[in-house]
Amino acid sequence: MASELERAMEGLITVFHNYSGKEGDKRKLSKKELKELLQTELGCFLEV
């Protein structure tokens, strides 16, 4: 059975792969991909 931390890491990796590779390398986020990930997934944290 996976630990809470292992499940959290798996979730982070899954979200990363949902956004990476749209503009090339699946192992990296472009600036545009990173911006989309942050705005979509962490929008509430980024509101000022």
Image (cartoon, grey):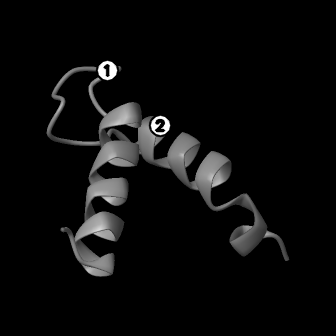
Q: Amino acid at mark 1?
A: Glu
Q: Secondary structure at mark 2?
A: helix
Name the residue nearer the viewer: 44 or 2.
Answer: 2
Name the residue nearer the viewer: 33 or 40.
Answer: 40
- Residue 20 position, x and y percent, is 31, 34
Q: Which mark is residue 35?
A: none
Q: Is residue 4 above or below residue 33?
A: below
**Which quarter of the figure has residue 23?**
top left
Q: Which residue is mark 1?
A: 23
Q: Is residue 12 above or below residue 22?
A: below
Q: Name the residue located 33 percent from the left edge and 78 percent from the top edge.
A: 4
- Is 43 on the left-hand or right-hand side of 38? right
Q: Secondary structure at mark 1?
A: loop
Are the two marked residues, 2 and 1, in contact with CB atoms closer than 8 angstroms? yes
Q: Name the residue located 77 percent from the left edge and 67 percent from the top edge.
A: 44
Spatial separation of the CA atoms under disc 2 and disc 1: 9 Å
Q: Quadrant of the C terminus?
A: bottom right
Q: Is residue 23 above or below residue 5?
A: above
- Residue 3 position, x and y percent, is 24, 77
Residues packed near mark 1 inside 10 Å, few (<14), some (14 to 19) or many (20 plus): few
Q: Quadrant of the N terminus?
A: bottom left
- Is 38 on the left-hand or right-hand side of 32? right
**Which quarter of the figure has residue 28?**
top left
Q: Name the residue located 35 percent from the left edge and 20 percent from the top edge.
A: 22
Q: Amino acid at mark 2?
A: Lys
Q: Which residue is mark 2?
A: 32
Residues packed near mark 2 inside 10 Å, few (<14), some (14 to 19) or many (20 plus): few
- Is 28 on the left-hand or right-hand side of 7? left
Q: Name the residue located 36 percent from the left edge and 56 percent from the top edge.
A: 11
